[in-house]
Image: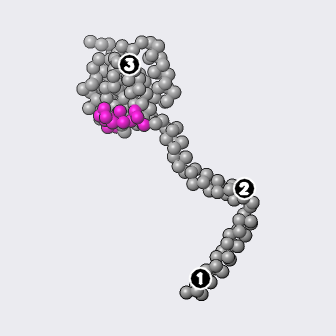
Amino acid sequence: MPSQSVLEQKKAIVADLTERLKNSITGVVVCYEGINTEDDTKLRKELRENDVKYTVVKNTLLSRACDECGLEDIKPVLEGTTALATSDSEYAAAARILCNYAKDHDNFKIKSGYLDGAVIDMDTILSLSKLPTREVLLANVLGAFQAPIAAFARVAQAIVDKGGVEECLAAKAAEEAAAPAEEAPAEAAE
């Protein structure tokens, strides 16, 4: 039977895991078996750079934390070596990084994941992994907003390059004045 201090430590770990699961918007559970230290260090660095928290966890402790968070559907995959990657800010970062890593490492497997407090299937995890980064998505949105403004700026610059607004307006007025005079004889001939 474990001592009281060991039980208290395990309760604290479960409480921390529970809080982490509740506060994160997404998480991925993986089997990290068979990866070397160099690859693991590179993986952890990339995850840190994308604000993803990655830790190796004991299956029994994660199972208890899942019970407290309502993520019981993750429990069947909690066997063997288990690591948990969670993100508080970006939905796709953990899935994208870990799925790309799993492509290159045969022993590294994605076990399960969750999104906004609900367990998701492997197809959803793979779909998340194919989304571009947050910065790329923001750049695309900003590009869409800037396109009309940029087009207006190009038109305005073309007017300036042709000789200015006054000359363009004068030319337009001259065209309009000439147009009714040309149409009048055509009507008289009828």
Q: Secondary structure at mark 2?
A: helix
| Residue beneath the point at 61% across and 80% down | 183
Q: Residue 139: in sight, yes or no?
A: yes
Towards the viewer: 69 or 179 = 179
The residue mark sitting in front, 2 or 1, is 1
Q: Earlier in the sequence, mark 3 or mark 2?
A: 3
Q: Which residue is mark 1?
A: 186
Q: CA distance from mark 1 to mark 3?
A: 80 Å
Q: Is 101 part of what is drawn in magenta? A: no
Colour logic = one colour
Residue type indicated by callout 1: Ala
Quadrant (top left/top right/bottom left/bottom right) for the C terminus? bottom right
Q: Is residue 40 left or right of residue 14?
A: right
The reply to whether discs 3 and 2 touch (Cβ–Cβ < 8 Å) is no
Q: Secondary structure at mark 3?
A: loop
Numbered mark located on residue 105 in the image:
3
The reply to whether discs 1 and 3 touch (Cβ–Cβ < 8 Å) is no
Q: Which residue is mark 2?
A: 161
The span shown in magenta is: 117-131
Quadrant (top left/top right/bottom left/bottom right) for the N terminus? top left
Please provide percent x and percent y for residue 25. 40, 36
Q: Is 120 part of what is drawn in magenta? A: yes
Quarter holding residue 63: top left
| Residue beneath the point at 42% across and 12% down | 36
Q: Is residue 174 above or below residue 67?
A: below
Q: Is residue 134 left or right of residue 31?
A: right
Q: CA distance from mark 2 to mark 1?
A: 36 Å
